[in-house]
Amino acid sequence: MIRVSAKAYGSILIVISFYLSGCLNLVSNDEFDNDSGMYDRVPVWERSEWPYITNQSYGFVMEEGPYQILETDNEWNSTHHFVNFELPMSEGGSAPNGVVSLAVWLPDVPEGVTVPVIAEFGPYFDETSVETPSIEVPGTWLGQMIIDQILPHGYAFAQVSVMGTGRSNHCMDLMGNAEQLGVDAAVTWLGTQDWSNGGVSMIGKSYDGSTPWQAATFGNEYLKTIVPISGLIGVMELMWKNGSSEARAPIMHNGVYGSYGIDGDEEDVGNMCPDYIIGPGTGVAAYMWGSEVAGTYWEERYFLDRVLQNYKGSVYLIQGMHDWNVDPHMAVPVINQLKDVGIEAKGLFGQWDHDYPDRPDYHFDRSSEGRGREAYPEMVRFDWMQDLLEWFDWYLKGEGQKPGLFVEIQSNQGQWRIEDRYPPQNMETIAMELGGDLMNIAGTTTILPNGNFGPIYESEKFSEDIWIAGLPRLHIEVSTATVGGQIYALLEDCSEDGDCIHIGHAIMDLRYHEGGKYRKVRLPIY
């Protein structure tokens, strides 16, 4: 059975009508042709039969590569470089002399052999003293694994500090224009070195999963494929949905990342950039009014439209469906938008939190009963490193078989299935009216400000299994005591003994009842 409950904030709420839409998935794996050539070197439906290493804290490739790392004069076998590029004077700070700091690891290949590069761009190198005291030290979260497992197959690896962090100059621009230009300049540098075959990939999680989207906006010829893991298609989209704001929104720029690049020396003057100065006010304004009040702060930090227009590479999109930090709407229905414009894209959407797909300890520790743990241990993808290698082999070297461009999606009970798109096509819509198909079992439709919980509605037990796919919709009509207010809805899968599993939740600022970025408030008539 499914259960819907609601709570209101800042107003009295009276529910007039109320129904839920869900989706019944009718697609089976039998619809995919195993002989079409459109699958990985080890097809996903056969991987349970292969001897993947499953007793470690992350995944491993199936076999070691033929190359050793190229030794250098430091203990990490890296080399450090600065990339110079021109910053517009309007960016202030260090303009026009932009400088990006990066480190590179190379395989020891025969003379004359060139290799593609896999790069991670982010603000954390040189900033977290214990894990990355220097950008020349590989990140423990991902970099070391790529160096140990994928580099020996003939790949270079790079770590790049975004503007205003590490030894990159300028200000911490929080994904703004200066940061984007620095990312693009570093991609070009990596693609034009004597050791490079001209193919660059970007990979990373969270902030480091957002920089690939930034790079893809330019249509840079060297950027062949990106692997965003819980990354942002836009900064405002991280913290606002239908006008409703998270509490961290007003402080995200200066409060969370403002100290990066500032260490009290004379070079800090280069961090005084216009967007750094207006960042807090812009965040507070959007928190209060839900949209861009003046200027182009948020527009500058929205990437998806430019990616769809300009990018010529491929995308391997990875998202935790229980991600508390970067919500799944960064991937759903983004995966379909990519496919619709002809971008070759693959999705891996599991029931983990803000994590990589192959981390069993994190997956267990960050899940809880009713909030993802039901999908453990099936959520742990020990085949992920091999999957990455096969993806890079094809898109950076043109070797192997073309990966399957489908979406692997995991249910909240742990089962994996394959969809051509997500949300999938050929779905059956289930519409359930509250007070009818869904019975009121508790609560009231009149809710006092910040007081009692709203109504709880529950269905009868379903006679067959269903998959709710994509973003379920909840339509309501309300009367409020004030202009605005917010309503919160929770969707759960409950057993007859009362144990419930979280399926999804949403919050709506009633000033944005029509969706989008702009308020639609009906003022009273006198």
Image (cartoon, rainbow, N blue to C red):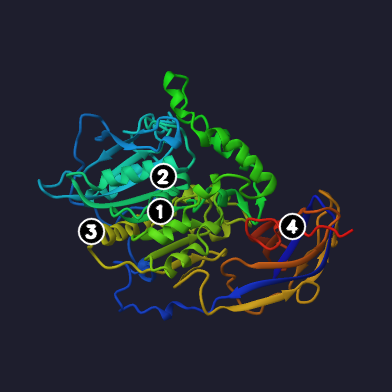
Q: Which residue is mark 3?
A: 397
Task: Inspect the image, locate mark 2, and give the three-letter code of the amino acid beneath it.
Answer: Gln
- Assess whether mark 1 and mark 3 are in contact (beta carbons under 8 angstroms): no
The percent coordinates of residue 254 (x first, y second) are 56, 34
Q: Circle 4 sits in a helix, a strand or a loop, which is it?
A: helix
The percent coordinates of residue 430 (x first, y second) are 65, 77
Is residue 204 shown left or right of residue 294?
left
Query: What whole-number distance in Å separates the C-alpha atoms at marks 1 and 4?
Result: 33 Å
Q: Residue at x 22, y 63 (%)?
A: 399
Vertical order, 226 against 41 (above or below)? above
Q: Residue at x 43, y 33 (%)?
A: 164
Vertical order, 400 against 207 (above or below)? below
The percent coordinates of residue 507 (x first, y second) are 69, 56
Q: 182 or 111, which is in the foreground?
A: 182
The earlier-in-sequence mark between 1 and 2 is 2
Task: Inspect the image, locate mark 1, and give the three-letter code of the amino acid beneath it.
Answer: Thr
Query: What whole-number distance in Å separates the C-alpha atoms at marks 3 and 1?
Result: 23 Å
Q: Residue at x 31, y 33 (%)?
A: 136
- Assess whether mark 3 and mark 2 are in contact (beta carbons under 8 angstroms): no
Q: Which residue is mark 2?
A: 180
Query: What whole-number distance in Å separates the C-alpha atoms at marks 3 and 4?
Result: 51 Å
